[in-house]
């Protein structure tokens, strides 16, 4: 009896299983309803809403200063960047130009935030695929950034450092010194990440050719961030729509064309080098100046619509504000990168095994509150 005869005699049947909302590889309370045939995935249906807090609706009752505090509860690993996005949108509406000092400090803080986020992603991706050591390496280095944040604004995760018109506080006297010490340290540790995981033969087998997303599909689904750039789609907001001090630094937009899980991994590893380069260009050149432009105690945006986009660690975050001229916005809408990136998961997961879905999801770097606003 040939192998084909054996396959013809085996009867298979599709059935459904739940992956989550408590599955550790879901990185939060995300439920995936999988239609599978054996171990082969036929369909992936995300079920959202387990951590929905109605942030956009809450913004309608709050002042513009208060809205900032809600946004770092979305993508909490990009909290500083989320806060900056709202501040930029409000400043655009008020026609406020912040000082060069604020622009440079915001950019440095944003890149430290990106580094801390990518470090956590790397450690957790390795752990998702069975490499527990990566988690400890990543958190060893990430703690140095969190210590800088804590000394600067008193928080380690949800920062609330940016305010409309500038910054809540000036940088700590130790900020420049500790940031440079971190860069010197991490330049010797990032190569360890490559030695430990990037070139690992098991890791390569689990990621190369897995979860392929074409450039055309990335554009069609509105994918952004490292997921899009792993498919060759140039979408870095910092490059194409510069804000803060990104127009005064030289950095590369990292692109790979293979579109698989391994390419998305390599994008983030390379981006960490670029983030360090951006910080190095700015850290010794922080200009003097005010840390906050004069604003009224009660901010009222003029009647109209205002939009601002930024590049978070996961992709493009858009902030839309519809104002009727009062102290509260009439409508606020966040275009979160995680929600758009999740939309393509079913398309690229059909025909793969459940273990491959875990690897693919790890390369997407989902933060569920960013999806479930």
Image (cartoon, rainbow, N blue to C red):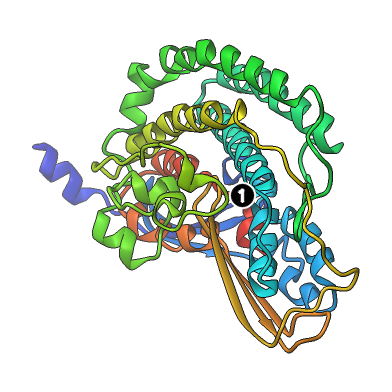
Is residue 136 visible in this depiction of the protein? Answer: no
- Give the image quarter of residue 117: top right
Where is residue 88? Give x, y as percent. Answer: 64, 62
User: Up-down: is 70 above or below 146?
Assistant: below
79 relative position to 367: left or right = right
In the picture as drawn, the residue positioned furthest to the right comes out as 297
For image coordinates 66% across by 25% down, the residue present is 142
Q: How many marks?
A: 1
Front residue of this view, candidates 237 and 256: 237
3 relative position to 233: left or right = left
Front residue of this view, candidates 345 and 214: 214
- Give the image quarter of residue 266: top left
Instruction: Characterize the local packing of mark 1: few (<14), some (14-19) or many (20 or more) Cα atoms within 10 angstroms.
Output: many
User: Up-down: is 368 above or below 155?
Assistant: below
In the picture as drawn, the residue positioned furthest to the left comes out as 2
For image coordinates 37% across by 51% down, the residue present is 228
For image coordinates 68% across by 63% down, the residue present is 86
For image coordinates 42% across by 55% down, the residue present is 224
On-image quarter of the C terminus: bottom right
Where is residue 316? Give x, y as percent. Answer: 50, 57
User: Up-down: is 352 above or below 111?
Assistant: below
Is residue 306 visible in this depiction of the protein? Answer: yes
On-image quarter of the N terminus: top left
265 relative position to 188: left or right = left
101 relative position to 130: left or right = right
In the picture as drawn, the residue positioned furthest to the front comes out as 288
Q: Which residue is mark 1?
A: 367
Where is residue 146? Give x, y as percent. Answer: 74, 29
Where is residue 174? Give x, y as percent. Answer: 78, 22
Secondary structure beneath label 1: loop
User: Up-down: is 370 above or below 58?
Assistant: above
């Amino acid at each position: 009896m040939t192998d084909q005869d054996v396959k013809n005699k085996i009867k298979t049947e599709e059935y459904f299983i739940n992956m989550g909302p408590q599955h550790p590889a879901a990185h939060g309370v995300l439920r995936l309803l999988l239609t599978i045939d054996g171990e082969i995935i036929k369909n992936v249906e995300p079920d959202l809403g387990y951590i929905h807090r109605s942030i956009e609706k809450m913004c309608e009752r709050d002042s513009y200063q208060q809205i900032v505090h809600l946004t770092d509860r979305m993508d909490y690993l990009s909290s500083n960047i989320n806060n900056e996005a709202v501040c930029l949108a409000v400043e655009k509406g008020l026609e406020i130009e912040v000082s060069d000092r604020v622009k440079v400090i915001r950019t440095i803080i944003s890149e430290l935030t990106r580094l801390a986020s990518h470090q956590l992603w790397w450690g957790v991706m390795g752990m998702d695929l069975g490499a527990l050591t990566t988690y400890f390496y990543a958190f060893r280095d990430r703690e140095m950034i969190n210590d800088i944040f804590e000394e600067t604004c008193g928080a380690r995760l949800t920062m609330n450092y940016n305010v409309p018109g500038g910054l809540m506080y000036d940088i700590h006297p130790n900020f420049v010194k500790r940031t440079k010490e971190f860069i010197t340290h991490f330049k010797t540790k990032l190569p360890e990440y490559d030695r430990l995981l990037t070139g690992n033969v098991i890791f390569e087998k689990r990621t190369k050719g897995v979860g392929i997303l074409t450039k055309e599909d990335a554009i069609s689904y509105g994918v952004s961030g490292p997921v899009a750039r792993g498919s060759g789609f140039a979408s870095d907001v910092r490059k194409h729509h510069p804000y803060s001090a990104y127009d005064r630094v030289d950095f590369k937009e990292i692109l790979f064309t293979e579109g698989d899980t391994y390419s998305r991994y390599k994008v983030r590893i390379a981006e960490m080098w670029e983030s360090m380069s951006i910080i190095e260009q700015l850290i010794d050149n922080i200009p003097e100046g005010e840390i906050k432009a004069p604003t009224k105690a009660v901010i009222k945006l003029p009647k109209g619509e205002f939009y601002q986009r930024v590049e978070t660690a996961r992709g493009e975050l858009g902030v839309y504000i519809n104002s009727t001229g009062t102290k509260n916005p009439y409508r606020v809408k966040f275009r979160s990168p995680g929600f758009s990136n999740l939309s393509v998961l079913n398309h690229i997961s059909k025909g793969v095994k459940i273990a491959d879905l875990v690897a693919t999801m790890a390369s997407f770097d989902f933060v569920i509150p960013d999806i479930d606003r």
